Amino acid sequence: MAAPAKTAIDKLKGRDTNWKWHLKEKTDLIDLLYGGATSPREGTPSEIALGFVLANSEGFIGKSASDDDAISFEVIYERKCRKGNTVRLAQMYSGIPIYGADVAVLVFEEKRVIHAANRALPVAHLSDVHMGKRPYKEILPIIRDHVSALGGPVVQENSDDIELLVWKGNPPLLGYRTAFHIGVERRPWEIVAHAENGTLLHKAPLFSKPHKKENNKKKKPVHSGTTEGE
């Protein structure tokens, strides 16, 4: 187990028992926490979830968020569920959201955290973010050319619905995320384009059915553990 994850898990073990966890294969950081419960917290579910992520950020991103001014977390939604409230927190870099990087926290009705799923990016992967960008309208013609190659006429329904984000490349860089309707059937696609040169970083149809998997068996976690009985 990597030192940051061990530090975070040791803290959890010192405060609460019965936590179980899975670690990510490539980074050895926390992938999933479940089976335990914190002591009751003060505040709203969003405040409780944010406090939990920040207190255990070493295990989620490999470094305490308080030690890195560029890294922060922001609540993007809170939703009522059967067991309490699910809160999703986006990982930010210099105030800009990182594409697909977040932590989902389940706050039980008694204001206890009982589950956390981590998709945040390790701080080590954010050491050299390329921050170059041009105004979106300036590179829109380039983006349109690339998008039209996907198949037919291109329409951007809402040119104001543009999001600047950090794309998880190597190295990470800035991108613009938006949606285009492509072809005579006006199929909606999510597009992420390089914020400096307009090349496509990501393209995916929206509202499409998930691909059917040939094997639906769950993969056994590479690393797992438990504090049960301690």
Image (cartoon, helix red, strand yellow):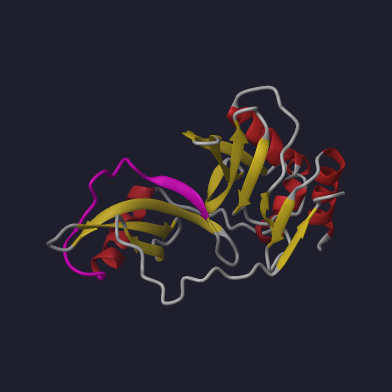
Residue 117: x and y in percent read 61, 50
Residue at x-position 56% and y-position 53%: 131
Number of marks in the rendered image: 0
In this rendered view, identify the residue nearer to me: 136 or 186. Answer: 186
Extreme-front residue of the structure: 229
Residue 55: x and y in percent read 76, 39
Residue at x-position 36% and y-position 68%: 211
Residue at x-position 81% and y-position 40%: 16
Residue at x-position 12% and y-position 62%: 184
Say if the magenta span includes residue 157: yes
- Quadrant into which the N terminus falls: bottom right
In this rendered view, identify the residue nearer to me: 94 or 55. Answer: 55
Query: Within the image, what quadrant is residue 160 found in?
Result: top left
In the image, residue 131 sits, relative to residue 146, either above or below, namely above
Say if the magenta span includes residue 39: no
- Determine whether, in the image, residue 82 is placed left or right of residue 106: left
Question: Residues in magenta?
Answer: 149-166
Residue 82: x and y in percent read 50, 36
Query: Within the image, what quadrant is residue 25 found in?
Result: bottom right
Q: Main secondary structure of the magenta part?
A: loop
In this rendered view, identify the residue nearer to me: 49 or 21. Answer: 21
Extreme-bottom residue of the structure: 214
- Determine whether, in the image, residue 118 is placed left or right of residue 212: right
Residue 229: x and y in percent read 84, 50
Extreme-top residue of the structure: 43
